[in-house]
Image (cartoon, rainbow, N blue to C red):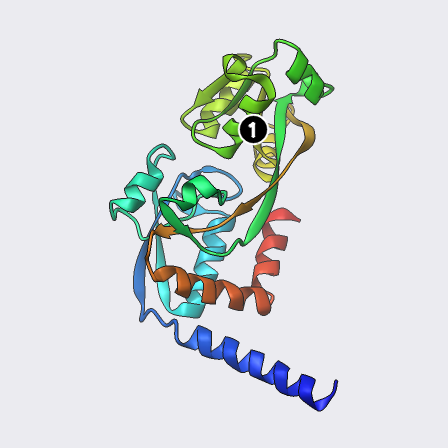
Amino acid sequence: MNKVSKLVTAALIAATFSLVSAQDLGGRVLVVGSDTTYPPFETVNEQGAIVGFDVDVLNAICERINCVAQFTTTAWDGIFAALANGEFDVVASGVTITAERDEVVDFTESYFSVDQAIAVRVEDEGLTVEDFRAGDLILGAQNGTTNATTAEAMVGRDRLQLYDDFNAAILALINGDVDGVMIDDPSAEAFVQQYAGQLAVGIREVESGDKLGFAVQEGDELVDALNAGLLQIQQDGTLDAILDAWFN
């Protein structure tokens, strides 16, 4: 590395350190709205605690910017309106960054990307995308999600059954009310483990590359602090360690 490159690198490191140092929230408690029915991103464990990938990521960010994340369970339907009304400081709920949502909230930089999948009953593991597109099979999904949008594009509204949360959609699949559930791939795996022997991830070809981010009120400078903390956990390897813990 030449002298100029060393100087540039040093300047970048110094600028990053300055950015992160400037985002000290002084121990502020952040009320975090989350639909805690979506493992492995967020769920309620047997002890009644809210746990998950999003929880660990946001807690790690708060360690860097001196805040405390206080998670609270809320229904997905209306979660962004509740954020806009000031009920939460942050929404952390496996939220896909979309242009439509970006009109009403501000997003952090993305911290994870997912593709979508279709969970099916074990006996239907051989079903294909074409079976759903061309046949009369019914898909389920959670209302107001990008999964529902993808499912509707695949089978049409008449063959799409919407549910308030993915727990209800998965139970409908087990009970035979729908033939598949469009869901993010990691969550499909989590439900397959929860209902071992009953469900399978039958289709993984629904590539979408959805980018997830944390949402704050539009115009809230909190987004800068969250991005600073996110940058730090990306650079120091903490985010990779959390990814390994939840997905490997």
The x, y position of residue 8, in whole percent, is 62, 83
Q: Is residue 154 above or below residue 74?
A: above
Q: Three-letter amino acid code at disc 1?
A: Thr
Q: Is residue 208 above or below residue 163?
A: below
Q: Is residue 62 above or below residue 96?
A: below
Looking at the rendered structure, the number of numbered marks drawn on it comes to 1
Q: Residue furthest top?
A: 136
The x, y position of residue 215, in whole percent, is 40, 50
Residue at the spot x=57%, y=64% of the render?
Answer: 234
**In the rendered image, which quarter contains the N terminus?**
bottom right
Describe residue 101's horizontal placement relative to residue 150 as left or right: left
Res 195 → quadrant: top right
Residue at the spot x=60%, y=42% of the render?
Answer: 114
The x, y position of residue 45, in whole percent, is 45, 42
Q: Is residue 98 visible?
A: yes
- In depth, the one of 240 and 12 nearer the eye is 12
Q: Residue furthest bottom?
A: 3
Describe residue 82's horizontal placement relative to residue 120 as left or right: left
Q: Is residue 44 visible?
A: no
Describe residue 132's horizontal placement relative to residue 37 as left or right: right
Residue at the spot x=40%, y=65% of the render?
Answer: 225
Q: Which residue is mark 1?
A: 150
**Mark 1 residue crowding within 10 angstroms, few (<14) / some (14–19) / many (20+):** some
- In depth, the one of 169 and 156 nearer the eye is 156
Res 24 → quadrant: bottom left
Label 1 residue SS: helix
Residue at the spot x=30%, y=64% of the render?
Answer: 28
The x, y position of residue 118, in whole percent, is 62, 27
